[in-house]
Amino acid sequence: MNIVIVGCGRVGAELAFRLYQHGNRVSVIDHSSLAFDNLNPDFRGHLVEGEALNRDVLKRAGIENADAFAAVTNSDPLNAVVAHLVRIVYNIPNVVARNYDPRWRSMYESFEIQVVSSSSWGAQRIEETLYYTEIRCVFSAGNGEIEIYEFSIPPAWEGHRFSELIPGSECQPVAITRAGTAILASEDHVLKSGDIALVSATLNGIRELRQRLARQES
């Protein structure tokens, strides 16, 4: 793939090198040549110094032949505008922007831009890790609005149906692993102590599930 990245800070440099390692042709744009020092010495992509909103700069980076584009600077207005520009003007099929300040999140949504909000997602994951160790997140969709969690069924829930454990519409069964074999789970599935359960849930849903597990244990 031909991929253009705007922003060569820590995130942009790490992203560029990861994409390069997987065989992609990567161009990196930054307004400061000093930013390219953040790149791994083994990176062999194309470097373009200049302002990302300058069409000549975008052209030199290969935007006209790009398959994907990422705007990952620490400026939310710049990320949103340049991502919108390349999606509309250059018809890039896959455009992703970094949301630096969560207060600017609605701006990306108004442009219908796929966004990764590292601050919001990171804070939520750290909170979960600090508070809860018995249920761990194994997959996060979007920016953490929906996540998949894994936990072991405690002895107190032996013989209960999954529907008795699931708190409501914000928490849904995904799978059960028993004796090393995984199956798709339904609400009627009868639980056994030691089963490894996977559920998809919102943050509120997983909080309610934790409360149910704690009440039953007590």
Image (spheres, rainbow, N blue to C red):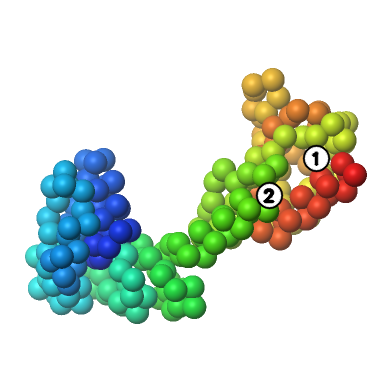
Residue 164 picture quarter: top right
Residue 80 picture quarter: bottom left
Give above or below for 110 relative to 154: below
Identify the residue at horizontal 32%, vertical 65% (top origin): 72
Q: Kindly identify which residue carries mark 2.
A: 132
Q: Earlier in the sequence, mark 2 or mark 1?
A: 2
Identify the residue at horizontal 71%, vertical 24% (top origin): 178
Residue 88 visible somewhere in the drawing: no
Q: Secondary structure at mark 2?
A: loop
Q: The residue under label 1 is which amino acid type?
A: Phe
- Residue 100 lies, in percent from the top left, at 41, 70
Q: Secondary structure at mark 1?
A: helix
Identify the residue at horizontal 64%, vertical 27% (top origin): 182
Label drawn at residue 127: none
**Residue 134 relative to residue 31: left or right:** right
Q: Mark 2 packing: few (<14 Cα in 10 Å), some, or many (20+)?
A: few
- C-alpha gap between disc 2 and disc 1: 21 Å
- Residue 206 lies, in percent from the top left, at 71, 53
Q: Kindly identify which residue carries mark 1.
A: 162
Residue 180 picture quarter: top right
Give above or below for 63 relative to 139: below
Q: The residue under label 2 is which amino acid type?
A: Tyr
Give above or below for 214 relative to 196: below
- Residue 63 lies, in percent from the top left, at 17, 63
In front: mark 2 or mark 1? 2
